Image: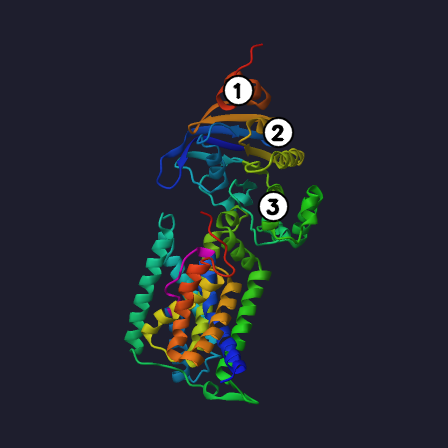
Amino acid sequence: MLELAEVSTGYDGGPNILEGLSLEIEKGSAYCMIGPNGAGKSTVLKLVGGILAPRTGSVRFEGAEVGGLRPDQLLQRGICLVPQDPSLFTKMTVRRNLTMGAYLETDRSVIRKRLDVVFEMFPILAEKEQQSAGTLSGGQQQILLLGRALMMKPTLMMIDEPSLGLAPQAADQIFEVIEDLKTTGITLLLVEQSVERGLAVADWAFVLDLGQKRFEGPSDQIMSDPRIRELYMGKAPTIE
Amino acid sequence: MNILQTLILGLILGGVYALMASGLTLLFGVMRIVNLAHGVFMLLAAYGAFFLFTELGIDPFASLIVTMPLMFLFGVVVHRLLFPRLEGSDRYSEMTVLLTFGMALVLEGLLGFFFTGIFRSTSPAYATEAFLIGDLIIPKGQLYGSIASVVLLSGLGIFLGYTKIGHAIQATSQNRTAAQTVGVNVDRISTIAFGVGMALAGAAGSLLSYLFTFFPGQHWQWLAILLSLIVLGGLGSIRGAIVGALLLAVLAGFVSNAFGATWSTMTFYLALFAILLIRPQGLFGEKEAV
């Protein structure tokens, strides 16, 4: 579905953050990227989401080269990014934020149907439909971001640090929502600071360091790999 | 002059100021640029209305249907030609200030070349007539200008609140990156917003042509007044620009009555300093995160 081949990129005129990164993602599964700060995890999402263009290498989605396309062009192909920065329209209502998610859809009846699906999936959003998004709690804002992403009807949803800045209870709630998203058949690519949470929800994991892929494998194996536990989860290997 | 008279005159003049300021604040909201050429764009339209009035006998209000679309197109061309060169610059905001400053100087020079530096004004009959209601004097020209401003600002409100492009402009204004992530082509929307801002400057120019006398170098004075209005309201907030315009126009009226007309203009500049000292984010603005 998505294939990055020997991709290098960075910000503005700065050095490369990704250095010849290659990885592949299959349709319908959930993936998680882990690694230390500065490994380039969020940069991968920005690259695939069209915020950054590759300097070298290729980004192919469903067989076509998509590297360097604008975010709106990528959305039309089904790629959506839920960024880590505060990215709600805080002065708009919850409902308007959601309908902005379907900005590229022109059929109003389709937008209404998607809205119904999102409200059914996240009743809290239906409850606060007319409330300004800026007045929601951190957890509710994150749910709204995921709901807005669903309105785009993506085939690949990339979520950057969904639990960042949330209280543990709210973070648990977000991961329940992500579990629900898995049942919709959408391919998920997740970057998460809480490695254990991220791996628990994913089927497959990539370990990035210094802009390159160090390991990859089923997330349960990555989780139990003593080297990875020591290097990236701050836990000493257990003696068995 | 009694208090009610001053209040009414201030409010109707404030309505016109609100129209003048709306384009400036819209551009700041969407593109985060302070368009230093906004005043000269208004004068460009005012000279256009002056030309149409003196050469073809077209009323300043009728000239709106010419100045607004022409200024919109001019804005689209200017934005497409000049602004993409600055995209990606680390100093985008500073560069746009220099660019619009340069545009203002060039246009001021061109206006001076074609129309000379003498004071101009259109003179439709209603510009010097007034309604008398009891002791109250309501100048027809100012009242009509204010009504036109209310109609145009309502149109702007409907456009922003109820159309897809309007929603995209609002979204880009609130969070440019988020707008991109939902599929808004922010470059295209910025161009449209620039055109809309210029169309509003065009409308303001047509009204200015009979409400005030004007000459090419006067745009700096207008810019200073409009900046004080939008800083008071909160940069980027159209609602703020309207409230700021009404408040300061009324205040300037009372200051003029009490201390003389010279101090009326000073009101705007003093208000600008006071706002920046007391509440830099303005009435409807948000504090910048540090």
Residues packed near mark 3 inside 10 Å, few (<14), some (14 to 19) or many (20 plus): many
Give the residue at the far top of this rendering.
A240
The residue range painted magenta reads B30-39
Q: Secondary structure at mark 1?
A: loop
Q: Which mark is residue A235?
A: 1
In the rendered image, the vertical position of residue B233 relative to residue A85, given as above or below: below
Left or right of A121 in this view: A160: left
Labels 2 and 1 in the same subunit:
yes
CA gap between label 2 and label 3 equals 21 Å
Residue that mark 3 sits on? A148
- Any magenta on residue B120? no
The label nearer to you, 3 versus 1, is: 1
The chain carrying label 3 is A
Residue at coordinates 59% horizontally, 29% vertically from top-left?
Answer: A197
Query: In the image as oriented, which residue stretches furthest toward the front?
Result: B258
Q: Mark 3: which secondary structure?
A: helix
